[in-house]
Image: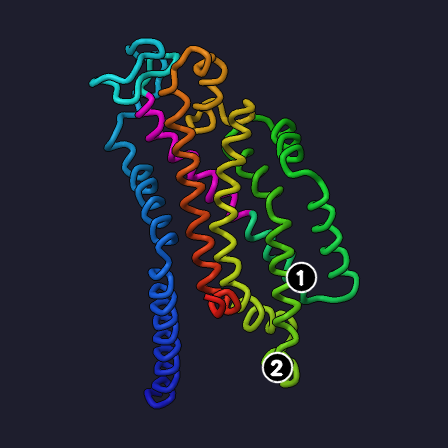
Amino acid sequence: MTDLAAPRLSARHLARQRRLASYRRTWRAFRRHRSGVAGLAILLVFVLVALAAPLLASSDGLDVTLANGPVLGAPSSHYWLGTDDNGRSVLTLLIWGSRISLLVGLSATVISMVIGTLMGLVSGYFGGWIGRITFRVTEWMLVIPFLPLAIGLATVLGPGLFNIIIVIGVTSWPSTALLIRSQTLSIKERAYVERAEAIGGGRWHQMGRHVLPNVMPMVFANTTLTVAGAILTETTLSFLGLGDPTRTSWGSMLDSAYQVGAITTGSWWFVIPPGICVVLVVLAFTLIGQALEEVLNPRLRARR
């Protein structure tokens, strides 16, 4: 029994060591991209702020009935970033708003990646009517303007955090599907896939063991770019009043600032901080995505 298990354990150990070595090579290559490292540092700061929100600012500061600050008060020693139209600290709103913005961006991206990867794999690997139908659906989704479609779905489903996540997730997958489809069409013609088919490997076996692992690096790189778009979409929908009115996000802060005329009254502290936070997070994900795409794509890596 021990003799039979030893080769299996050693094979697992060898596979684990290869994966660890691959991760280390990827990290070393990523560290050479200064822009990617800068984006990762910015993102880590916002993630830490979101996780430590209860320690940095009390959630009571979000309650309008407990607010006791001046209306649209300028920054001071007590309110570092001023107050909103309800007398609440803008800094407190920013800290707690980071949770909602990041949560919506990441959750919607997961939905988008799952749908896009499945549609891309099916349309690229399977021929016949299955592949044609999935590809036509993807093309149809690409033809429809993204923002009007998201606004229409958000209006139908109604305001709510879960609804916003669903709306962004089910409207942002077509570009991922096209990317995965092109990769799948290339991978399925390679020799190792043909050998797997020759020795009796079924289609699902080939997809799960050969095609999917080879497209996952592109999925991972595209994920970071999709998160940036999802956060911008959440900000846009919240700014249009289609977000969750019971939750504070950077988009809802911008909407409130617009509604009370913060720009015309010169209350810049209610507009600029959430706008800067949105820009920085989107920039961070974009820099990380570009660096990962270059690291994981052999063609781009060869040009460097």
Residue shown at 29% from the left, 33% from the top: 53
Q: Nearer the viewer, residue 35 or 246?
A: 35
Residue shown at 63% from the left, 55% from the top: 177
Q: Is residue 288 above or below residue 131?
A: above
Q: Earlier in the sequence, mark 2 or mark 1?
A: 1
Residue shown at 46% from the left, 48% from the top: 286
Q: Which residues are magenta?
A: 90-111
Q: Amino acid at mark 2?
A: Ala
Left or right: 31 in relation to 212:
left
Quarter that holds the N terminus:
bottom left
Q: Quadrant of residue 185?
A: bottom right
Q: Secondary structure at mark 1?
A: helix
Tag 2 residue = 191
Q: Nearer the viewer, residue 1 or 180?
A: 180
- Tell me the number on the disc at residue 298: none
How far, Cα to Cα, is label 2 from label 1?
20 Å
Q: Secondary structure at mark 2?
A: helix
Residue 206 picture location, percent across and down:
60, 73
Q: Nearer the viewer, residue 237 or 35?
A: 35
Q: Is residue 258 magenta?
A: no
Residue 116 picture location, percent across and down:
60, 53
Q: Amino acid at mark 1?
A: Val
Residue shown at 45% from the left, 41% from the top: 282
Q: Is residue 99 magenta?
A: yes
Residue 133 picture location, percent across and down:
76, 55
Tag 1 residue = 122
